[in-house]
Structures are given as structure tokens and as C-alpha cells.
């Protein structure tokens, strides 16, 4: 049964070694590192525009690689909307964080992770609470992807015991 009121879920990684973990959680953003594309707002809002620009910058890469990377940036800029949910399976503490997108795309030129969107982290769910199949989807080798097959399972786990509550002083 298709439920049109269920928002889209996007999975994201914090870098190969979880480098952006602290930035994600402390600053309330999700980010992508730069592949030389610069401010994505300056590219025409088509997949082909992103693909062609990335291909110009990386002419020796294979078509699947440049198509995948260009697509990641296109989705981050043009398909993610305020109200969508972000799923971040953290390597560092074995939790799956869930956030709501609260801001539009921003390019912060001085950051190691210049492609950013503001989020509000809402839940932290232990990975052990998920089925093996959901963990496989969460473990996809992609940096930024749509989380589809197990979103109903995730929705069922978004309950009070896993709610992130801010304490006085900004601690969680």
C-alpha cells in the first residue's frame, strides 16, 4: 500500500572514517565534500548539467562513477526538500540517527564539506534494533542515497525511547 503522506527518506554517510560525524550532530547539518563542482546553485537544474560538469572535471573516470557522483549532487541540491527525513547510520557509535531537513541547500566555500543543508536531529536508534535486511540497505556503499525498502520499519522505530531531547546547555 502506498502512503503519500510518508516523507522521502535519504541516507547519508559522514565520510570514509566518519569525518563529518561531529559536524552533522554538533552543527545540525548534513554535508557532502566537494568534488570540484563548486556552488551547485550555479549549475542548471538538470541531471545532464551536473553530469556534464562533473565529467569535464574528471574526464578519466568511468561512466558509472561520474554518473553516480553527479547524481548524488543533483539529488542533494534538487530532490531533497524541507520536511524530508535523513537517515545517518553512524560508524562511530552504532546508532542510526534520524533528522528532518529544515533548510535549503547552502554552499560554504571555506568548509571541507561545503555542500550543506540544515537538519534537526530527532532520533537515535541502536542498529541492533533493525532487521538484517534493513541493515544491509543502511550499509549501502553510496554516500548519499534514497532509503526506500525499509522506511516503514524505520518509521515504526521512531518512538519516544529513541527521541533525542536537548538538555539545558545544548547537550543531548
Image: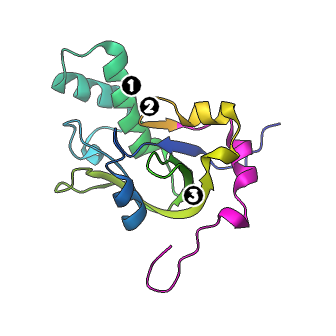
Q: Which quadrant of the figure has residue 148?
A: top right
Residue at 72 percent of width and 67 percent of height: 160
Task: Give the CA distance from mark 3 to mark 1.
Answer: 24 Å
In the current view of this chain or complex, which residue is farthest to the bottom?
168
Task: Give the CA distance from mark 3 to mark 2.
Answer: 22 Å
Q: Could you tell me if the residues under marks 3 and 1 are in contact, i.e. CB atoms within 8 Å?
A: no
Q: Residue 68 carries which label?
A: 1
Numbered disc in front, either 2 or 1: 2
Compared to residue 142, the image places residue 105 above or below, namely below
Numbered disc in front, either 3 or 2: 2
Disc 3 designates what residue?
83
Q: Could you tell me if the residues under marks 2 and 1 are in contact, i.e. CB atoms within 8 Å?
A: yes
In reply to whether residue 114 is colored magenta, the answer given is: no
Quarter of the image for the N terminus: give it: top right
Q: Which of 160 and 111 is in front in this view?
A: 160
In the current view of this chain or complex, which residue is farthest to the right?
1
Q: Residue 142 carries which label?
A: 2
In reply to whether residue 155 is colored magenta, the answer given is: yes
Q: Which of 78 and 116 is in front in this view?
A: 116
Q: Which quadrant of the figure has residue 22?
A: bottom left
Amino acid at each position: 500500500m502506498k502512503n503519500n503522506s510518508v516523507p522521502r527518506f535519504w541516507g547519508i554517510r559522514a565520510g570514509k572514517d566518519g569525518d563529518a560525524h561531529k559536524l552533522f550532530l554538533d552543527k545540525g547539518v548534513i554535508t557532502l565534500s566537494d568534488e570540484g563542482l563548486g556552488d551547485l546553485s550555479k549549475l542548471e537544474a538538470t541531471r545532464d548539467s551536473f553530469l556534464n560538469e562533473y565529467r569535464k572535471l574528471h574526464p578519466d573516470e568511468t561512466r558509472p562513477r561520474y554518473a553516480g557522483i553527479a547524481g548524488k549532487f543533483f539529488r542533494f541540491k534538487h530532490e531533497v526538500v524541507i520536511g524530508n527525513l535523513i537517515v545517518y547510520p553512524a560508524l562511530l557509535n552504532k546508532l542510526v540517527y534520524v533528522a528532518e531537513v529544515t533548510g535549503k541547500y547552502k554552499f560554504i566555500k571555506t568548509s571541507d564539506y561545503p555542500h550543506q543543508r540544515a537538519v534537526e536531529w530527532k532520533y537515535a536508534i541502536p542498529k541492533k534494533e533493525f532487521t538484517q535486511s534493513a541493515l544491509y540497505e543502511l550499509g549501502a556503499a553510496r554516500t548519499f542515497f534514497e532509503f526506500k525498502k525499509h522506511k516503514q520499519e524505520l518509521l515504526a522505530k521512531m518512538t519516544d525511547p529513541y527521541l533525542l531531547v536537548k538538555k539545558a546547555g545544548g547537550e543531548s
